[in-house]
Image (cartoon, rainbow, N blue to C red):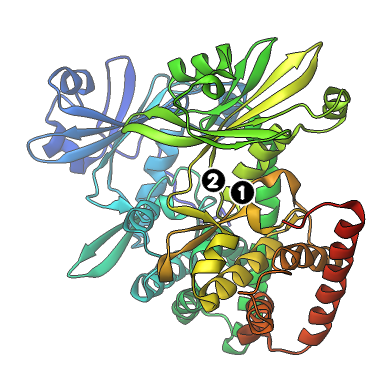
Amino acid sequence: MHALRTRFSWNQFANRRSFGGFHWQISPNAEAIFGSSGPDLEGWRRNGRARILKTGLQRTIERIELPGAALIVKTCRVNGPRSWFREVFRGSKARLEFENAQALIARGLPTAEPLAWASAHRLAPGTSILITRCVDAVPLQDFLERQRITLPLALARKLGTTLARMHEAGVAHPDPHPGNLLVTFNDESPTFTLIDVHSLRLGPPLSWSESLQNLVLFNRYFQLRASRTQRLAFWNAYRAGRTFAADQSAEQIRELEQRTTLSNARFWNHRMDRYRKSNRQYRVIGDRSVRGHAVRELPDPFVEWLMNNPDAPFHDPDARVLKDSRTSSVVELAVPTASGLMIAIYKRFNVKSSLHGIKNWFRRSPALRSWDFGQNLLDRGLPTARPLLVLERMRGGLSAEGYLLTERVPDARELSAAVADGPQRAWADSLGRLVRMLHDRQVAHRDLKAPNILMSGSGADATIVLIDLVGVEPGKPVSRAQRVRNLARLNASFVHSPKVTRTDRLRFLRAYLAWGLHGREGWKSWWNEIAAATDAKVARNLRTGRPLA
């Protein structure tokens, strides 16, 4: 696959210069932009022409506004042994991206025009710089999420055509998520530009096996956010641009969907360790008496205030108390953010027995489980309140009370109240689809009851949100027995509700079993198993004296 790769050496262009502590390679097309003196990065920064778009340990990206052009300057850094050895064997990122962009243009594929690259050393790894012409476009992911739309059919077809051209040209992007595709509209017709191309694989046209690997990575994002109709439009456009045998199309798309489902599951399970480490999204906080984790955007003074006294919000006489029981206490809490105060939900998990700390030595505490599972459900595209911070008091090396801060679900009501007031058809269909999605994405919920489900908004725009995730079990395929138990627990919440009829329950089950896609065969066995498990749950609660919730 690498045999046809186009390489550009130091001798490719005559315009090679050394200044400012860097060795520069400048494209002939850039002479009119830089002038005879070459790129003057420090001068542009001093003159206020540079604006930082993104910065981190690995790289900094700046936009430079010049009289005749807008530029993107990417400064890549070697920030550890792994990146150092990587550059020893494959060269600097700036050089790779420069060369790969040249190769894409030679193949007639759209990418940002490379103008110059530089390295601090000719041979040894170190800081490198890439300058490209700025493309007036936005990342596709940002466009879809800011516009709050899924994937228009015209955009889906254009995406399929674009990926087909890439694969036919022998180009595979190892990280083909929609953030690495810029989209612009000319006369309402979308055009895509490929960016972040330093690790492209170049060679002959991709075989089906190689294409499938790349399509699975691309499809992971859209399988969660685009409908089957939209994904089919993408596939038909992609298929029309490839040379595979036409009679294999049905098997290929089925294989693509199945492989994407498995790939997403591995990705979600792998991320479970990320939520309690310091990285770009999360940070470890605390000391020997109070420890925990928080999202990066929470301001330090607020985090320190809560760490110094996690119980302070519960002693505030002006706090709005939502719950105060033996097991937990919940209040609303104003959280300072960059855009102003945000009302969040703050929950304390009380110590229920002397064995609480010992149990938590062998398992994650309820607060930590809620933190981990909340982040993981969001990664799986499932609606829940986003956790912002978790804390644990430590006594004798064992965890005691836990504290969880989450975003507040706007205009939220418990499902029981929403069912009592609203039309049954809407919530039954929505809830059935959500629980099916929960199970299909390898999440069981042994405490799936009405108080743990909120309805946000009303009417056709209402959204169902899962809360109180201590009973969630993510990470493994959900067996039929587990599905039946989860559905029976939810069904038991409405045993005594006069508003929920047999027709409503059948509508829920029809949505859960996706009759429109899989047909209605076997629904009666599901109905009977759920009914039997519900009766057993009701009888068990009667024996123990516990009310059904």
Q: Nearer the viewer, residue 186 or 43?
A: 186
Res 294 seen here: yes
Q: Residues within 10 Å of mark 1 (few under 14, many from 20)?
A: many
Rendered image: mark on residue 403: none
Residue located 61% across and 65% down the image: 434
Left or right, 185 with reference to 353: left
Left or right, 103 with reference to 499: left
Mark positioned earlier in the residue sequence (1 or 2): 2
Q: Residues within 10 Å of mark 2 (few under 14, many from 20)?
A: many
Res 204 seen here: no
Image quadrant for the C terminus? bottom right
Rendered image: mark on residue 467: 1
Image quadrant for the N terminus? bottom right
User: Which of the 4 image quadrants contains residue 255?
Assistant: bottom right
Count the numbered circles shown: 2
Q: Amino acid at mark 1?
A: Ile
Left or right, 23 with reference to 364: left
User: Which of the 4 image quadrants contains residue 3?
Assistant: bottom right
Query: Taking 374 as reference, is 452 above or below it?
Result: below
Left or right, 478 with reference to 266: right
The residue at which mark 2 appears reads as: 385
Circle 1 sits in a helix, a strand or a loop, which is it? loop
Query: Taking 182 as reference, is 16 above or below it?
Result: above
Q: Nearer the viewer, residue 280 or 252?
A: 280
Circle 2 sits in a helix, a strand or a loop, which is it? loop
Residue 16: image x %, image y %? 28, 29
Q: CA distance from mark 1 to mark 2?
A: 7 Å
| Pointer 1 with pointer 2, Cβ within 8 A | yes
